[in-house]
Amino acid sequence: MTQHIGIVAGSAEGAALCYRTICLEAPAIMGEHDHPEITMNSVPLAEHMRHIRVDD
């Protein structure tokens, strides 16, 4: 049984790379044209930076 993979996006580039890598590598394990269910959630980087800037 395949697992559901969740991606928490910190940047568009990083999230896209993770998604692409999963989809490219999965067929070797799961079979042709197959990959696990993937959910992506994106929180704007500004939300993270607000806390980083105040050392929280």
Image (cartoon, rainbow, N blue to C red):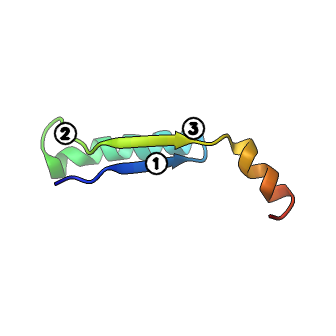
- Write down the residue under mark 2: 34
Element assignment for label 1: strand
On residue 37, the disc is none
> Residue lying farthest top?
33
The amino acid type, in three-letter code, at marker 3 is: Ala
Q: Percent x, y for residue 51? A: 79, 56
**Residue sitting at x 24%, y 47%:** 26
Question: Is 46 or 16 nearer to us in this picture?
Answer: 46
Whole-Å distance between the Cαs marked 3 and 1? Answer: 11 Å
Residues at badges 1 and 2 in contact (C-beta under 8 Å)? no
On residue 12, the disc is 3
Element assignment for label 2: loop
Question: Is 32 or 49 nearer to us in this picture?
Answer: 49
Question: Is 3 or 18 nearer to us in this picture?
Answer: 3
Identify the mark nearer the N-term, 3 or 1.
1
The amino acid type, in three-letter code, at marker 1 is: Ile
Residues at badges 3 and 1 in contact (C-beta under 8 Å)? no
Specify few, some or many for label 2: CA neighbours under 10 Å numbering under 14, 14-19, or 20 or more.
some
Quadrant position of residue 38 = top left
- Write down the residue under mark 1: 7
Specify few, some or many for label 1: CA neighbours under 10 Å numbering under 14, 14-19, or 20 or more.
some
Q: Percent x, y for residue 39? A: 41, 42
Q: Percent x, y for residue 4? A: 31, 50
Identify the mark nearer the N-term, 2 or 3.
3
